[in-house]
Amino acid sequence: MEFIDYYKILGLSKTATESEIKKAYRKLARKYHPDLNPNDKIAEQKFKEVNEANEVLSNPENRKKYDKYGKDWKHADEIEKARKQQQQYQQTYSGNSGGYTEHDFSDFFESMFGDSGRKFGGRRTVKFRGEDYNAELHLNLTDVFKTEKRTLTVNGKNIRITIPAGVYNGQVIKIKGHGGPGIGGGPNGDLYITFSIINNTRFKRENDDLYTTIDLDLYKAVLGGEIEVETFDGKVKLKVKPETQNGTRIKLKGKGFPKYKKEGQFGDLYITYNIKIPTNLGQKEKELFTQLAKNKH
């Protein structure tokens, strides 16, 4: 994995205090936030880098490991453990009157970690799994109504992925083997993608169901009739019952959002009627409403 200078990303020196790190992060996160830079791929990448840098440097323990081991900081505990074991057994075999051989020492590491096939401080070492990568993918709600393929660029590499319809905001999926390269011949890490779904519609999404409110004129509410309404994937005609009350909610089965990884299955669409009182009435209309009011008594 290529070394990333987190201090440089935040515009700080290695002697920066926790307060300076926090201040720099807030300033840059605000500057490159996707909401303030729509459709700006450069700003989106900067925002990811700033968040990654903050996650490491704002944690004292992680910062200490990063300062010491750089790009391999996530493997600090394993490296320290291996070094201690190495020193311990060097001392043990050195104190033996018979001495020790390269073969003896190699056998010890092989018995603990298996045949790694590479050297560590002159001796065999354990294979370390590559670090996991984390990426955030920003999409509109309309983008995840249907299954589609996307090409992502992660650490300079293009990765073709399939995004299933119905992905949720905040959902994380794992792409196996597309993380950092292993150390000492170990396996690659994985890539974890977090979906940030922006609702660019007038529908409210709750799980697989959709909710919306539509205006209904008073005459249609009283007398009933037929109206045309928008759903997520087109218009449909609805029959309105006579004497429909304000706030009435109806359900359109199967007109909601697709269910994640359940092809052909959808949630429901719930429509709430908001009855609009007519305005700018003419004299004749006022007389008719007056007559209606008198007939009610």
Image (tube, rainbow, N blue to C red):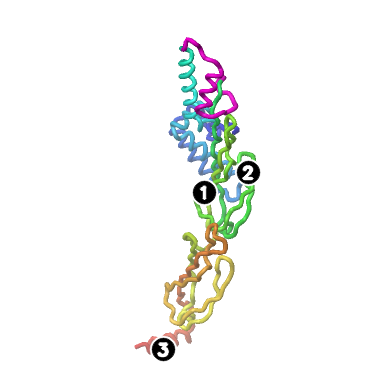
Given the image, on which type of amino acid does mark 2 rest? Thr
Q: Rounded to the nearest whole Å, what is the CA distance between mark 3 and mark 2?
A: 70 Å
Q: In this view, does 157 lie to the left or right of 35?
A: right
In the picture, the disc for residue 291 is 3
Disc 1: which residue = 172
Instruction: Say which label, 1 or 3, has the lower sequence index.
Output: 1
Given the image, on which type of amino acid does mark 3 rest? Gln
The reply to whether the magenta stretch includes residue 106 is yes
All told, the count of numbered labels is 3
The reply to whether the magenta stretch includes residue 34 is no
Question: Residue at the spot x=50%, y=40% of the render?
Answer: 27
Q: What element carries label 3?
A: helix
Residue 272 horizontal/vertical position (percent):
46, 70
Residue 101 horizontal/vertical position (percent):
54, 15
Disc 2: which residue = 153
Given the image, on which type of amino acid does mark 1 rest? Val
In the picture, the disc for residue 188 is none
**Which circle, 1 or 2, is nearer the viewer?**
1
Instruction: Say which label, 1 or 2, has the lower sequence index.
Output: 2
**Which circle, 1 or 3, is nearer the viewer?**
1
